Image (spheres, helix red, strand yellow):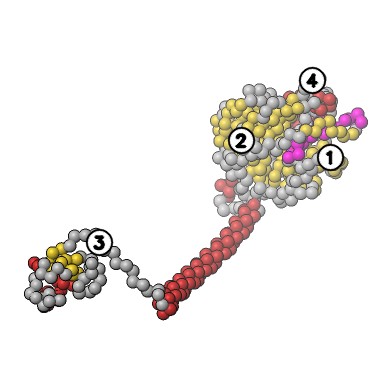
Amino acid sequence: MLCAISGEAPQAPVVSTKTGLVYEKRLIEAYLSENGTEPSTNESLTTEDLIDVKGAKTVRPRPPTLTSIPSLLGVFQEEWDALALETHTLKQNLAQTRQELSTALYQHDAAVRVIARLTRERDEAREALSKISVGRRAAAENGDAMQVDNAGLPDAVIARVEATQERLSKTRRKRPVPDDWATSEDVSLLQPRGDPDVVYAKPSSLSLDQSGDLALIGGAEGNAGIYSISKQTILTSLKGGSAITDGVWAGSRAIISTSAGKVKVFSDGQESTSFDVHAGKATALALHPSGDLLASAGVDKSYVVYDLLTNTTVTQIFSDSGLTTLQFHPDGHLLAAGGMDGQIKIFDVKSGSLAATFQCSGPLQALRFSENGTWLASVAAGSSSVSIWDLRKSAEIKVLATRGRIDCLDWDYTGQFLLTGGPEGLTVQQYSKASKEWSEPMLNAVFASAVAWGPAARTVVAVDDAGAVKVLLTA
């Protein structure tokens, strides 16, 4: 069925009642509006004479366009033009992306340079600050005065130091080894007790109280706690505010130092006193044998002495290097401090003057006086050996080599057992007065970042970087 006018299949077919011919509705209506007659017979015809034909909608076939070479070339040309346009757009986008990347890299490089400059200025400011000898009390009294001379202890405190020295030095040489003290055979049998308890991540310090049951453990995340060895649990948590660098016991009081330079004293789990003297990180603590004087070391090249009876700062003594560790002599008249410059600095406690120096291979990691009063053990950072110094000869008399890096050490009460700890494990070095020889009665693979002797040297307490508390007992 084709339209009588166009000869194509109509989309809307209508039929004439006069001739019976089929037309496309829009075409015949346009023709009638102009002529008013039927196209084939020229008879009069109106739209009322047209009848719509109902049927399925006719789908026009697509006209054949690719039946000749010119049509194919036309299609190929259109495809080529589209491809060329798309390639041009991609190149524009690539150039824009490269420009944006170049700008981002330039900004990153500028940011890195600014960060490097700020870091350098910060380090220079810290270095300049560490060279300023400032005491808080002196600054308050002298206004703008910045340089403060090192001052010794007050007379009343000196009297207490001298009384302690006289009392302890008289009995030190004649003091016998307690009957229940561990022997070399006992020490060789030390083994870990059960599974370790995990307390604080990355613990930085360990200190046992006089009973040997309570361990003061400080963590790098600003938390410290009092751990009961017998109950295997944390009894009290202490808030340091910043990373804990060291901890000691003063009787029943727990004392910690922090990376913010503060020294905090806790009684019954509550903070009772806080000192903020160091200009920078406070690195170590040491308790005087009298039990009522405390010293702290700092990266500001000074150590500070506090009176725990009056909760006041007694003096601040400056040196020529940042200090990493310190300990009082067993008689209390000397203070040994380890420097970042690799020197062990021996100070006279009463006057604050420098009495002697010993040169080590690097920044000091740990210091411990022997209870015999004449020997000092030291470890440099990253070292696998312990140096033994004789205070009478002012010389290194022995180097004790171990099987790995040493991070901590502790001397027992009798001065015959020297405990060391590190990532390779624990070792105990023993000195025999009878043979005047050193031996190694114990070697254990227990990793330790801090160690301490327990009662009668029959117990060793250690903590590792994972925060696990390990207790070694004799069999």
Q: Please say if 188 is above or below 150.
A: above
Q: Main secondary structure of the magenta part?
A: strand
Element assignment for label 4: loop
Circle number at residue 200: 2
Residue 161 within the magenta-colored segment of the rendering: no
Q: Is residue 40 visible in this depiction of the protein?
A: yes
Left or right of 399 on screen, residue 215: left
Left or right of 362 on screen, residue 99: left
* Mark found first going from the N terminus, 1 or 4: 4
Q: Please say if 191 is above or below 27.
A: above
- At horizontal 56% and vertical 47% (from top left) the residue drawn is 140
- At horizontal 73% and vertical 43% (from top left) the residue drawn is 365
Tag in front: 2 or 1: 2
Coordinates of residue 74 in the picture (x, y in percent): 41, 77
Tag in front: 2 or 3: 3
Circle number at residue 57: 3
The amino acid at mark 4 is: Asp
* Mark found first going from the N terminus, 4 or 2: 4
Distance CA(mark 1)–CA(mark 4): 27 Å
